Image (cartoon, rainbow, N blue to C red):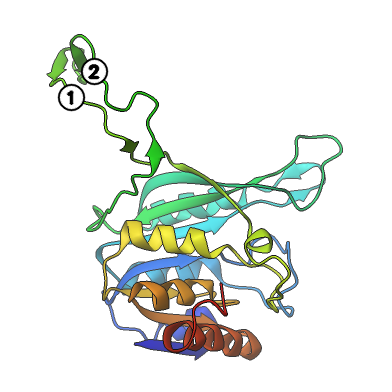
Amino acid sequence: MAEFLIGDAKDCLRTIADGSIDFVLTSPPYDDLRNYEGFNFDFQEIAWQLHRVLKLGATIVWVVGDAVVNGSETLTSFKQALYFQEIGFNVHDTMIYQKNNFSNPSRNRYHQIFEYMFVLSKGKPKTFNPLKDRKNVYVGFSTLGVNTTRKQDGSFTKQRQRTIEEYGMRYNIWKGNTSGQENMCKHIDHPATFPLWLARDHMMSWTNEGDLVMDPFVGSGTTGVACAELNRDFIGIDIEPKYVALAKERYVRTRYLDTRLIV
């Protein structure tokens, strides 16, 4: 099932039932870093609506960065995270999306190559399927000596000896290609897209097959493409009709035709 809604996110969200959404993955239009046909969004109202429509234990992955204005980073990303916390979300994790290249070289600071990925939860996350593809250096070796974990009162808990597996769980910094690198020599008619691998990996981490996923700023529809590939239901919202049409086209082509055509 997939549904595509045209309209302001805050208005469309009001039509969605309480406690019906399993997961939200989105990259909102932050700090006027791109021209989105002149539209802006009511962040606080949308944050409240997201809290209402999410199931208990559902999560949001909020991919966001900051502009530099008058020589200072705006910290809009952290202001948004703190507001989510203020209205009842847990800031479950602060992850980093580290890009393999950068868009604009910096002259008086180090090149900007990352965005934040705030993982927000409504209560304790109900789903976590950790991706275990980090190659362990000491695969096959046993842990040596007595391994301990310090408790809050200062005492120690002994851990059992174990054999190190070939692959371990990822860290919370994910490094990979940008959408431009992922779609080399292809054109997607949208000013800011995030890569499909990022959407796919988050979806595998925080959802299960058949879950209902939403992107309230659907843009080019990458979240929907990942849903089509991974058998998740999807709701996409955007105020710009041409982006909704693009997102729907990419979803349909991926779900019902040939996934190799749209990546």
Mark 1 lies on a secondary structure that is loop
Q: Position of residue 160 (x, y in %)?
A: 12, 21
Q: Position of residue 135 (x, y in %)?
A: 40, 36
Q: Are marks 2 and 1 in contact (CB under 8 Å)?
A: yes
Query: Which residue bears the numbered disc 1?
Result: 162
Q: Quarter-wise, where is residue 106 in the image?
A: top right
Numbered circle sitting on residue 27 = none
Residue 7 visible in rendering: no
- For the residues labelled 2 and 1, the Cα–Cα distance comes to 6 Å
Q: Position of residue 9 (x, y in %)?
A: 51, 79
Residue farthest to the front, as pictured: 140
Looking at numbered disc 2 in the image, what kind of residue is underneath it?
Thr
Nearest to N terminus: mark 2 or mark 1: 2
Q: Is residue 102 left or right of residue 220?
A: right
Q: Is the residue 69 above or below the residue 179 in the image?
A: above
Residue farthest to the top, as pictured: 145
Identity of the residue drawn at 43% across and 89% down: 256
Q: Is the residue 50 above or below the residue 178 in the image?
A: below
Looking at numbered disc 1 in the image, what kind of residue is underneath it?
Arg
Q: Position of residue 77 (x, y in %)?
A: 57, 51
